[in-house]
Every structure is written in C-alpha cells, then in structure tokens.
Image (cartoon, coloured by chain):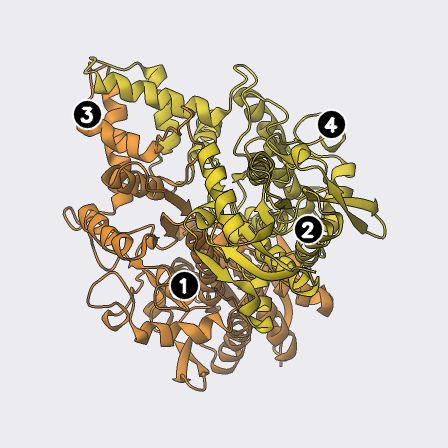
Chain colours: A yellow, B orange
Amino acid sequence: MKKWNAIVGQSGGPTAVINQSLAGVIEAAAGCGKIERLLGARHGVRGILNETFVDLFSIPKEKVEALANTPGAALGSVRKKPTEEECKAIIEIMKRLEVRYFFYIGGNDSAETADLISRSARDSNYDVLCFHVPKTIDNDLRETDHCPGYGSAARFVVQAFMGDECDNRALPGIKVNVVMGRHAGFLTAAAALARRYEDDGPHLIYVPERPVTRELIRDQVAEVYGRLGRCVIAVSEGVIDANSGRPFLEIIKGQIATLSQQVEDGKAGISKEEFECIRLIAGIEIDSHGNFLLSGSGTLGDWLAGYIKQSFGKGVRVRADTLGYLQRSFVGVVSSTDATEARECGRKAVEFATRTETNGTVSIRRVTNEPYVVEYVMNELKKVARDTRTMPDNFISASGHDVTEDFVAYCRPLVGPLPDIARL
Amino acid sequence: MKKWNAIVGQSGGPTAVINQSLAGVIEAAAGCGKIERLLGARHGVRGILNETFVDLFSIPKEKVEALANTPGAALGSVRKKPTEEECKAIIEIMKRLEVRYFFYIGGNDSAETADLISRSARDSNYDVLCFHVPKTIDNDLRETDHCPGYGSAARFVVQAFMGDECDNRALPGIKVNVVMGRHAGFLTAAAALARRYEDDGPHLIYVPERPVTRELIRDQVAEVYGRLGRCVIAVSEGVIDANSGRPFLEIIKGQIATLSQQVEDGKAGISKEEFECIRLIAGIEIDSHGNFLLSGSGTLGDWLAGYIKQSFGKGVRVRADTLGYLQRSFVGVVSSTDATEARECGRKAVEFATRTETNGTVSIRRVTNEPYVVEYVMNELKKVARDTRTMPDNFISASGHDVTEDFVAYCRPLVGPLPDIARL
C-alpha cells in the first residue's frame, strides 16, 4: 500500500497544552503505518503557503515529550482565514508534496479553515482528508463536552483567585479581576472553584451570558462589602451592558474614540459626561502624601474599579487586575487531565482520519462524571466551524452573578486536584 | 524563671511565604522555654490596639504547617504607622498582657513601626523587645542579601515570562509586561532568568534605577523587532522618565489630572497634545471589521504599548500585560529556598530576641553562592527601618536595559530550579 504524507499545523491563540495535541498527532502518525512523512507547517496555513515545514518524524522522542510539556504553539501559530485563491494554492502544494492528510489544531476559526481547504480539495478533485483537533481556553467549541486548553487555563484562574482571596482577606477591600472570555463565561466561571469557605471569594461572578448594568454591579458589591467588609469580583472581559446590549469595553472605547475625534476635529470642548469615562479608566487616585498612586490595570478593570471607587468614596480600597495572556501561557500550571486529553485528541484525529478516510473533528464526550470518564468521538467539521457556544443556563445561578453546583461539578475534574491552603 | 507573653503580627503587602515566617515564630516561641503565650495580632498593630488576638500555641501543628504553605498574611495585614499616642496605648496593652516580646513580620515600614514601639517602650520604662522579621517581594530591604518573599515572587515572574516567550514566538509581535517595583528593579530584573536561548525574551529590561525616555524605548524595541520580528519587554511599574526625572506613571496620571481639572473648570477645549496621553492609555484600536478590539491592561502598559503601536503603525501586533497582585499571592508557585528561608527568619527572630534580649532584625548573609549557603545574622532595627535600597550597579548592564551575569548568578538560587520547556 502506498504511504502518503501528512501536514499538521497550529492556529489561533496558543494554550498550555496545544503542544500535547501536536505530540499526539506525531505519535499516532508515526505508528499508523499509513503516513510516510509528517510535515509541521510553521505558523499554520501561512507555513503551507510559504512551504516552511519541519520534518516531525526526525525529532527524537524525548524532544517531542519536552515540547508537549511546553506552552505556546511549538510550530508557530497564525490568525489567518485563507482566501479562495490561497486554498487553491494550498491544494496545489499538497498535490506536489503527496499530502493526503491535513491536521489543524485550533478553535472554531481553525475548524473553518480546515473546512475551507477540504472544500477546495473536493473542487480540485484531489483527495485531502482534513481533520480538526480542538483547542481553546474559552471552551466555546460546539459539539464537545469541553475543549483541550480550557482545563489548564481554568486551573490558572482558580489558583490566581485562591491566592487573591488570601491577599484580600489579609488587606480587605474591593478587588476586580478581569478574566479572558469575550462571548463565553466558562473561564471566568471557573473562578468559583477557588472557594473553600462560605465567605471565600469570588463573591460575584459576571459572565457575558448575563448582561448587567454598572449600577447593579455597584449595588451587589455594596451588599457583599456591607456583609464581609471586602469583595472579590470575577468579570469576563466581554461582560455586556444590559442597557445597550453592547460589551462595556466597547462602550468605553467608543466614548474615548468619540472624544478623540472631537479633539482631532478641533472642536472647542468636551462635556463632563464625555470625560468621566476617561477619568475612570485612568483611575486617578492621590494618596495622603499628595502623591499619585501608581495603581493601574486593564481598561475594563480600571474603569469598573474607578466607578466602584467613586461610588464608595475615600477609605475603601479598590483594586483591579487583568489576568491577561498569562492565562493561556503560564509555565508550570497545567491540569493533568487537560494535558492527557489534549494528547489523546491529537492521537484520535490521526486514528479517525486514517481509519475512516473522511474529514472531521474530534469531540470529547463525558461518559460519567464520578468517576470522571470520557470518550472521543468523531464529528463533522462543519458542526464546529465558525459558530461557537456559550454557557448553558443550568451553569449560571438564577441571580445571574454566580455559577451553579452543576457548573462546579462540570468544571472540577477538568481543573484537577488543587493545592491545599488553609486559614486561621 | 518567669515566663512572659509575646505578640506577633504581619504588616504590609502579603507574600507567598509570609506565613512561613509566622510558622517559624510559632515553632521557635513554643520551643524556647521563655514564652508562655504567643498572641497573634489580627491585622498588625491595629489588632494590638483593638486587642483582637489569636492564641497561636493552641493551633495544631498540622494546621500551622498548612498555613505556612498558604499565601497572604494569615493573621491579616495592615498598612499603618502608629502615632505616638497609639504607641503609648500599645505599650499599656503590652504591660497589662505581660508581653515582653514583639515580633513584626514586614518590610521597611514594619521595621519602622517596630522601632517606634521599641522607643515608646523605652520612654515608658517598660521592657519590650521588638524584633522585625523581613518580608518583601521588592527585595529592597537594606543590610540583607535578599528578602523572604522575593524568591517566590521572582519565580512567578520568571514562569510568566517563560510562558509569554513561548506565546510571543508562536504569534510574533511586541509585548510589554509591567512588573511590580516602584523604586527597585529586582523583581523586573528576575525576568531575565526566563531566557534559555540567545534570542529568548525578555529582550529589553527597564528598571527604575536607569531612567529612560520613551523615544529610547521605541528605538531599542525597533532594533530588536528588526532583528527578530518580535520583542518581549519587561518594565518596572516605577520606571523613570529621564527628561523629567519623574516616574512615567506619575507623568501620565498628572496629565490626565490636569485635563480633568480643565474639564471640571468648564474650560473650553483641550489640545491634541494633552489628549494624546489619554488616547494612548485607552489603547484605541479598531480591527479590520470596524470593531473595537477588546484589548487593555494597566495604565503604564497600555500607554507604552499605545506609544509603540503608534510608532510602528498598523500591521505590528503590540500587546501589554500588567502582572499585578498575582505576583505576590499566586497559589502554587513558591521557591522552596524562599519558603525555607522565610521560615528560618521567623525562628531566628525568636532565637535572637530571647537569647540576646535586645531589639533587632534578622538579615540573611550569603556565605557562598556555589553551593548556595546562607547564614542568619542579627542587625539593628534602625538600619532597616524607613530607607530602602535599589539594585547595585554591577547588576545592571552598561546598556541600561538589561541585567548582568552577576545579577543572574545572584537571583538563580533564590528562584530555584525551573520547569523544563523546549522549542523546535
């Protein structure tokens, strides 16, 4: 039987375990007996177009293992949707290189790219089997119980909130922590797993699935602060203003852009209302010695902290942190479940592709939660391409600013056993 | 021999190992034979004034051990310099409770508080021995080779930069990471330990000890970007503008405050120059679909990223993260050297105080670097109170935007063995 060549690429935002999936593809491809050479495309589809490849079968096993335990996309990643012309060019290159299998590790955009290439191949009457390997810290892919990459990012968020709870208890105040997630609140919701005691933070959790007003946030913070003398808040970066239906961050930036335009146009003045937003973002605060406090964080966190500070007045300590890119790249915080599953998704993609000789994606199905058992199933590419999912209703509490026990039960095995901490 | 009571408190910003020092005090106090009861003051001197104490000898050993491994100040912390009246009140309370030893775990401000209380005791002719136990992530205490708390915070910074380097290599661009440190660059400098290969980030390191201009930063970034197609930058939050001699963050906030005042005063307009600063902070960026990008981070990071973005033009990916409070509180990232030394500093404070019957502080002296061996010595309180230290010249490269091999050799044993990562 003729052996064919295969290409594997990584795409979209890296995760802590995206290289586990790459290692899974390498292992399974080497062992399946159907693949002659496995070419690693540098920076996804751009690497195919530029023909910058790495011969992955030539890499020693120990090196593959070390790469698997390294965050970031080892092959290099890309954010690129290939045009029709580029898809045709990719197919020509694959023909010339005798490539029959294409594995693309990424999120919904990457699934779409794999789908586009598979369509282009069909139009060209060239047989390339395109398989998507799921990856995203947002956990927003459809059809799968959860996504490789989510568990480790969630673990980072949980460990951050566990520590921040200790810090906030030591020096009480109001703390706003902004977590990644533009449309789906899964990662922000994971902060709930940081709780050990009844009064542990995060005390309030705001996700994009439940629009809210800043006045409501203020009132809910006031309730917690009145009760505990402190309050830790988890906010998704994509949290939505219930009045306008638009993300707060978009509104804030929009206000600044409007103001910027007025200045650019040489208009005479700006109103106090228009200016307020900027002042809140900047979080101006002067200490008792007349010095400017060097606090500061991301726009949403600063804006929200500024608004809360203004509402509560002096004497209340309000701080904000934006967890940022550390959530997806931090070295040394990995969920072992996540690592295992990411590896297995890579392996299964090769197994499914070479066995069934069709296009597809790998989905994870949770068989039982206690004990936690999953199985890997094949799904149609188009089912996960483009559209994403958000948190189901049963994961969000009726109040709208917390998660349910269902969510905690769902998330806990993905994050894995947590470090032990204690309080007096 | 009559046994006396003792008070222990924690003060200032918590660290990942400040409870190790508390555990050290508890252990040594229980074993020294001179202390009847050890009272833990809730939230430092405020807990003494309010007489909110915990009987620390009643806590089971396993619990003490669990607390030792928990970040944040278990007793609660405080940022408070007691007034003369309060010092007198504290002495009265100590007299009444038959307290002869006072242990205060904290930074230079806490050493000053211990010193103030010791003076007040002397004026009252009441014998209280005040001992300071060093703690600070900034590593800016005088007289000691390094401070408990620094090693673990530095470890967090290193692991963050190791991961961010992988992320930046996968999706190349310019990345600004703002690290804690208003006056001393030790924590920012630690980012250098993240490097494995010649071209690994951080490529540029800016510390408060070396004033710089934003134009110089831009030019140095351009040089790295031209060479590698990417650039990772570590910046201390307290980095100073060489033109004015003031921290950039103070200048930025000052500009916004001025602008704010003009608007408050109902003045007609603001100039483009005055407005530029705000626009940079806000980091307005519109993607190819006309949507506002929801990026954002702390003020300095956003401002610097905005300035760099403006200089480089479209097509160059510029991002900023502010590591924030995670640096001092993250659960699960602790340097074992740091943990051991923090514990030992607590023990030694009790040993020195009860043996010498004088006031003082514990300092760490590095006997040899390879193998790494330290000893603990007693120092005068006033030597570490108030004033702090910054990085010595031999730790900063001649270029001013990097560290030396001397610094790396100094810092490495404090951070401990790092996780293994690899690259293709």
Q: Is residue B116 left or right of residue A92?
A: left
Q: Can you give x and y, in whole percent of width and height, for residue B374 in the image?
A: 45, 82
Q: Which of the two discs, 3 and 1, labels the residue nearer the N terminus?
A: 1
Q: Please tell me whether mark 1 or mark 2 is closer to you in this view.
A: 2
**Circle 3: element type:** helix
**Which chain is mark 4 on?**
A
Q: Is residue B348 visible?
A: yes
Residues beneath discs 2 and 4 located on the same chain: yes
Amino acid identity at mark 4: Asp
**Which chain is mark 3 on?**
B
Dot 1, how many residues are within 10 Å of its Cα: few (below 14), some (14-19), or many (20+)? Answer: many
Q: Is residue B152 above or below residue A399?
A: below
Q: Nearer the viewer, residue A359 or A99?
A: A99
- Tell me the CA gap for discs 4 and 3: 47 Å
Q: Please tell me whether mark 3 or mark 2 is closer to you in this view.
A: 2
- Tell me the CA gap for discs 3 and 1: 47 Å
Dot 2, how many residues are within 10 Å of its Cα: few (below 14), some (14-19), or many (20+)? Answer: many
Q: Residue at x 61, y 27 (%)?
A: A220
**Circle 2: element type:** helix
Q: Which residue is mark 3?
A: B272
Amino acid identity at mark 2: Ala
Amino acid identity at mark 3: Lys
- Tell me the CA gap for discs 2 and 4: 31 Å
Q: Which residue is mark 1?
A: B111
Q: Please tell me whether mark 1 or mark 4 is closer to you in this view.
A: 4
Q: Which of the two discs, 2 and 4, labels the residue nearer the N terminus?
A: 2
| Circles 1, 2 touching at the beta carbon (< 8 Å) | no
| Circles 1, 4 touching at the beta carbon (< 8 Å) | no
Q: Can you give x and y, in whole percent of width and height, for residue B280 in the image?
A: 29, 34
Q: Is residue A261 left or right of residue A48?
A: left
Q: Is residue A142 above or below residue A325?
A: above
Residues beneath discs 1 and 4 located on the same chain: no
